[in-house]
Every structure is written in structure tokens, then in C-alpha cells.
Image: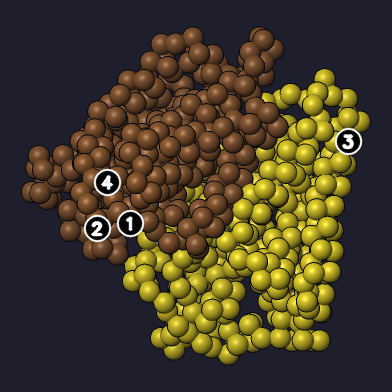
Chain colours: A yellow, B brown
Amino acid sequence: MPSPSDRGNAARLLRSGAYGAFAIVFLWFAIVAPGFLRFGNLTDVVQQSAILGLLALGMTLVMIAGGGNVISGGIDLSLAANLGLTAAIYARLAQDGANGLTAIAAALGAGLLVGAVNAVAVVRLRIVPLLATLAVSKIVNGLEFVLTKNSVVTATSPIQDWLSGSGLFGIPEMACGLVLIAVLVWLVVHATSLGLRLHAVGAHPEAARAAGLSVPAMVAGSYVASGLLGSLAGIFSAALVSGSSPGSGNYLLPVVVAAFLGVTFSRRQVPTIGGTILAVLFIGLLANGFQLVNISTDWIDGVEGVLILFLVGWTTLSQKESLDA
Amino acid sequence: MKSFHRYGLPFTLAVLFAMFASISPTFPTLANLHSLLMNHVALLSLIALAMTLVVAAGGIDLSVGTAVDMAGFAFIASLANGLPALLAILFGLIAALGVGLFNAVLVAGIRVPPFLATLGTLFIGHSVQQLSTGGGVPIYLIAGPPRPIFSEVDMARPWLSLAAIAVVLVVLDFSVFGRRIVAEGIAPAVARFSGLSVRRDIGLVMLGSTLLTGIAGIALSSGVHSYSPLSGNAYLMDAIGATFLGTTFDANRRANVIGTILGVLLLSTVKNGLLLAGVSFYWQQVANGTLIFTVLAISFSTKGKEATALSGH
């Protein structure tokens, strides 16, 4: 049996592994990639990470409230489809000349609705989250298909221009947006009683119930919040590519990878907001650095795969005694 | 009423079948059902059965598509390089087993949880395929001399699928190894304290199951006379869907062969039926998702009440 200190050591080791890998990659690119350390480049990395970051934040919330088991626990596979649908809704409305704010409101409403459907499916209908969100993502994906006829919808609006532009000190607004939203979510999850309850519900549903918490309400809330974050990602995406284009499904697995990679950055190897953001930035730095040193982007997926295996393998090997399967 | 949830899946399948048959005269024809079984059902059942084995053992395999792709790649590339057909098939299977071995080492050796291990494999598989095909260029063997092996594999599809059903059924339900992995899947901690090597067994399952995905990969690429990178991933979500839909057929919610096959039939019927029923092309996916969602809702919510009754003292 592993003693608590063994676990602590292992977690520390893993954390140092994750942070070490981050530092090595950062330093390596700083040395070999021309222009990598430029302020403008680094803020660009944050901007390019914004969409994945928002989606991964949603996934993290659901994972925190749903508990650690990947199959029966919390997971939201509809986030990528949510992005696709909300970007399409925004683009169609903006194209038809709707007010930018109206289009944003409609997109956010759709995202909330997707989240609510997930919440009902998981909490009320008691469908396994993996399956429920998969089925919902099929429907949502289909709705995007209906809306866009599977083609590019171009749309421009002042709000999009503002969102995809740069503000104070030349920092892209989207980078600011990601930081702002991440800080907000971090505050709620890690510094309020609501966040504490969220953790309690995910870690020990029975104990949380016994303590008088409403487990279904918290879990449902996490899916709704995830839906909202998905639609924010959709709006960001619409601003970044001036409309909507098919292929949102490409985000499905990267979101899962980012959220699980984030776990390796946390002290107790649980999903955390900070860990997820670090993981997202890590992935963003990799993509950016590869581009700067002219390595084919075909390598990125593989490097991400090796990274997650390396970091997760690192912990499990460092705590040989604990054999909990 | 007690076992109603168990029969939700076959019942819905029958209702859908009757519905599509009454809407579309083409749907119940022998030609359509034959092509449905030969194509979508045969391929998906192979992959879903592999998934069923892994899920029954308490894991999940997100890299089934990778094994499908690797097998197709090795098979087609071997043929393109003029190797004899049998050798090409052998290489195809070896390539799939390579993916399985990689998963097995990660899960049994380094003790990475199956979900993350196979997620890593999936991502590495993406890069391997992109890099080895110059950024994702397919290999076509459509032109050139006729290759009898393609039609032979096509003919063998239903038999391969039936053989896979029989083998997985025997392994899961009638073998000592099957008993063991099912026990490990239900209660890994208990199994481990009873002296079973949980991780070694799930590693073996992950290795063995890629034989099925490998066969599917060869059958798939043989059917289209080509290999296109990352095409196997299209089956991942359907295989997971079929397996977990299938768990509703088991009284204890475990992955089981008959349930999985019913799940495969349901997914294939819905896809084919909506197409033939003349549902607008763009709405098909919405209808598809909604139908599957409804089946899930029916099967899970009925079970859910019992579960609440049990846990809510």
C-alpha cells in the first residue's frame, strides 16, 4: 500500500515532469526558433490557444463535477460540435444582417441549450455521459450541417473585427478574453464555496449527498456551464475565421487531450483550471514553435500523444506500489 | 416491467425496421438488406466486437481506428509493392497487432489507464500516417491489373464477421480467460486481491482485439481498393456507440456480444433507413442522432429508476 507521502512524492515528481517538459520545450524553442520569444509571438500563442482553451475549460468543469472515471464519470464530447453549431448560428445571423450582439446572444443561447440537453440526458435520463454527449454531439453536428449545408459561411461584423483585433499594448483581444474567462472560472472553481461543492460532488458523490448537497444540480450545472463555454469558443472561432467553416469535429479529441494533459500539471493529479490552461498553452507553444522552425505540422499530433503517454507513464512508474487498476 | 429496459434495444430495432419498411419500399428488399449486412454491418461488427472485448475487461480502446488504418496501410502498401496477397494480409494483421502491442505495453507495462493510453496511440497514429503518406495522400490500387484478392476478401466478409461473433462469444462467455477478464472488468480491485493480474490480462485483451480491427482494416481497404489515411476513425464513435448501446441488453449493464451486434444493427439500420426514407440529406444526421438519443433515453431511464430505488435506501 502506498503511504500518503509516497503518493505526494509521486505527484510532485509528476508535476516536476510536466513543468519540466514545459520548461524544456519553452527553452528549446527560445534557442532554436527565431522570434519565438518576441512579445507579439507569445501573445499570438495565447490567441491561437483561445478556442481550444475555452473548450478545455468546459471539459474540465464537467470532469471536476463528474468524477475521475472516464467512462462513467464526467466527460463532454459535444463541445466540438457545440462550437461548430454556435459559430454557424452566429455566422448565419451576421450574414443576414443581424446586429452583432443579437447574433452573439443567439449563439450563447444555443450553447446553453446544448448544455441543458446534456444535463437532462445525464442527470435525469441517467445516460452514461460518454454516450449521452456523443449522441447530443451527433444531433448538434447535424444541426450545423442543416444550417450551413456543409459549406463555409462568411460573415463580418464590427464585433468580430474587434474580437479578432488587438487592444492594449497590441495584445490580441482573444488572448485577453481567454485570460479573463480562465481567471473568472478559476475564481469560481478554486476560490468559492460553489467550487468547493463542485469538487465534493465529483470526488465523493455519496458523501456530498450525505452532507446535503444536491449532486444532480451540481452535475447539471457543470454541463450547462460547459455548453456556455462551448458557445463562447464558437463566437471566438467565428471571429477568427470570419464566419463558420465545417470541420469543428477536429477539436473533439484535442479537447480531451488538453483536459487530461492538464491533470498532469496538478498537485493531486485531478482536473484543475490552472492545469488545463497550462496544458492548452503547452500545446499552443508546440504548434507555434514547430511552425517557426519549419517542422511539418504532421508531427504535432504525434508529439502530443507521446507527451501525454510520457507524463502519465511517468507518474504510474514512479508509484509502482499503488496498483489500483 | 422489471426487465423492460433489457428489451428496449431489440424492441426499438424491430420498430425502426418496421417503420422504415413501411416508409420505403426499397428498404426491406433483399438487395438492400444484403448490401447493408455486407458493408456497414460486417465492418462495424468486427470493430465493435473488438471494442466489446476491451470494454468487458474494464477498458476502452480509442485507437480502434488507428489499428484499422494501420492494417489497411500495410495491406495496400504491400500489394502496391508487388507482394503476394497472402503476405500482404499477413503484414496487414501484423501492423494492427503492432498497434495492439503498443497499447498492451502502455497498459500492462507502464500502467497507463486504457483511455489515456489509447488516446495517446490514436494521436501518434495520426502523425505516423500523415508522415508516411506525405501529408495524407491516399494509395489507390483501382487502376492496373485486376487483383482477385479484393473480391475474395469481399466474399469472405460475412464469414469473417460471423466467425468473429462466434469467437468473441466463446471467449467472453465460455472460457476461463473470459470469466477472468469479465471479473476484472466488474471489480478490478477484488480481482487483483484474488490473485489475478488485471493489467496483464487487459493488455492481452488489447493485443488480441486488434486482430479483429486488423481484419476490419483489410476488409475495408480491400472493399475500396485503396487506403486513405485516417479513414478508420469514422468507426470509432460508432463502435463505442454500438458497444454501450449493447450494454443495455445485459441485465447487469455489461458489454456483451449479442447486445453489441444489436447495437451495430440499430446504428446501421438507422443510417440506411433514413437515407432510403428520403429524409433530406442535411437532416439525416439530426434524425440519426435524435433516434439514438431516444433509444438511450428509453434504455437508461427505465434502468435508472431501479438504480435510484436501490441506492436511495
Whether tag 1 and tag 3 are in contact, CB under 8 A, the answer is: no
Residue at the spot 67% in from the left edge and 10% down from the top edge:
B195
Task: Tell me which chain the residue with mark 3 is part of.
Answer: A
Residue at the spot 17% in from the left edge and 46% down from the top edge:
B20
From the viewer's perspective, is the residue at label 3 or at label 4 nearer?
4
From the viewer's perspective, is the residue at label 2 or at label 3 nearer?
2
Q: Residue B215, image x and y in percent? A: 37, 35
Label 4 or label 1, whichever comes before in sequence order = 1
Up-down: is A219 above or below B263?
Answer: below
- Quarter of the picture containing the N terminus of chain A is top right
Q: Amino acid at mark 4?
A: Gly
Task: Tell me which chain the residue with mark 4 is part of.
Answer: B
Distance, label 4 to label 1, CA atoms, is: 12 Å
Instruction: For label 4, count other residues whose C-alpha is less than 10 Å away and answer few (under 14), some (14-19) or many (20+).
Output: some
**Which of the numbered marks, if any, corresponds to residue B70?**
none
Q: Amino acid at mark 2?
A: Ala
Residue at the spot 23% in from the left edge and 45% down from the top edge:
B147
**Which of the numbered marks, if any, corresponds to residue A8?**
3
Whether tag 2 and tag 1 are in contact, CB under 8 A, the answer is: yes
Q: Secondary structure at mark 4?
A: helix
Q: Quadrant of residue B222?
A: top left
Label 2 or label 4, whichever comes before in sequence order = 2
Q: Is residue B123 visible?
A: yes
Q: Nearer the viewer, residue B164 or B82?
A: B82
Distance, label 2 to label 1, CA atoms, is: 8 Å
Q: Which residue is mark 2?
A: B143
